[in-house]
Amino acid sequence: MKVYLKQPIEAEQFDGSSDLFMKYDMIDIGTMCEERHSPEIYMSGINKKVSVGDWIITDNFNHHTLMTDKEFQQQYAELPVIPKNVAGYIVTGHGLNDLISIGGEIYRAMIQAVVYGYQKGDIGDWIINHSDMFARAWLDGYTVKADK
């Protein structure tokens, strides 16, 4: 059996707002039927009822899939949010991948912070105190923390 990696997706949680209702071309069939008093919202092209809290997944081809919050939480994790200087360090490290394997480069980045020392507040300090997040950002991708 082969195992495959899921590609990054964009996801937006439906909050019942008219903005998302319009953006995803939804229809409310509850208002179209006189005997129904509660909304029954469906997304164009998906024969599934949309509820507040559901996730709308958009793939690379701009196709939409609908998931309940429980399904989404089981299958996806939000990308880690890292400081800008750490993101620069990762970009530089990935540039060296032609010379050193990915595993070796992560190891080198983390060990350098310990062996060569680090000062409180510098990149090495952040890497040591957030090692799991650093590894996830290196391998899976990340978002950069917004400047205040």
Image (cartoon, rainbow, N blue to C red):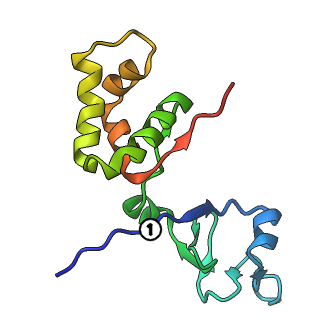
Q: Which quadrant of the view contains residue 146?
A: top right
Q: Which quadrant of the view contains residue 105?
A: top left
Q: Residue at x 58, y 34 (%)?
A: 145
Is 131 in front, or is 27? 131
The residue carrying mark 1 is 7
Compared across the picture, whether 37 is left or right of 91 comes to right
Q: Is residue 72 above or below residue 134?
A: below
Q: Residues within 10 Å of mark 1 (few under 14, many from 20)?
A: few
Is 106 in front, or is 22? 106
Element on which disc 1 rests: loop
Q: Residue at x 32, y 41 (%)?
A: 135
Q: Quadrant of the C terminus?
A: top right
Q: Is residue 9 above or below residue 129?
A: below
Q: How many marks?
A: 1
Q: Position of residue 71 (x, y in %)?
A: 43, 67
- The residue lying furthest to the top in this view is 119
- The residue lying furthest to the left in this view is 1
Q: Residue at x 40, y 46 (%)?
A: 94
Q: Position of residue 121 (x, y in %)?
A: 45, 13
Q: Position of residue 81 (x, y in %)?
A: 51, 39
Q: Quadrant of the N terminus?
A: bottom left
Q: Position of residue 37 (x, y in %)?
A: 77, 78
Compared across the picture, whether 1 is left or right of 124 comes to left
Q: Residue at x 70, y 79 (%)?
A: 40
Q: Amino acid at mark 1?
A: Gln
Is 81 in front, or is 125? 125
